[in-house]
Image (cartoon, grey):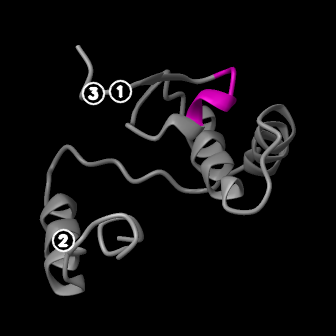
Amino acid sequence: MAIATHPRIYAPPTPSAKAIEAVEACLESSSLVLLAEGEGYWLRLRDALVSGRASGPLAHDARVVALCRLHGVRELWSVDHDFSRFPDLRVRNSLVA
């Protein structure tokens, strides 16, 4: 939502209603697994904040990394190059062969 509707990232940005509709379509998928904070989350977040030297907006990326680690995700597909600063999570740019 934050990226798709951001006017400095997309011109024109995706309208909020359309972005919400896309999220709701994803939530209907029977194979969707939502990741949430659980036991041990803070330790993983703290480690990601330190190892990735993350502060400010990068703290959100550290949160994503911590959730992936907590749930055993071995590879994150993203076009966001900021994830490369976290050494313990493999990141694959799905737009690059």
What residue sits right under mark 3 in the picture? 94
Q: Amino acid at mark 3?
A: Ser
Q: Nearer the viewer, mark 2 or mark 1?
A: 1
Quadrant housing residue 48? top right
Q: In the displayed image of the protein, which residue is found farthest to the bottom? A: 17
What residue sits right under mark 1 in the picture? 93
Q: Is residue 75 magenta?
A: no
Quadrant housing residue 52? top right
Which circle marks residue 33 in the picture? Answer: none
| 31 shown above or below 93 | below
| 83 shown above or below 57 | above
The image shows residue 30 at horizontal and vertical percentages of 15, 50
Spatial CA span between label 3 and label 1: 4 Å
Q: Amino acid at mark 1?
A: Asn
Q: Which residues are the magenta region?
A: 83-88
Side of 21 relative to 34 (left or right): left
Tell which circle, 3 or 2, labels the residue nearer the N-terminal end. 2
Which quadrant does the C terminus fall into?
A: top left
| 22 shown above or below 51 | below
Mark 2: give few (<14), some (14-19) or many (20+) Cα within 10 Å: few
At mark 2, the secondary structure is helix
Side of 25 relative to 82 (left or right): left
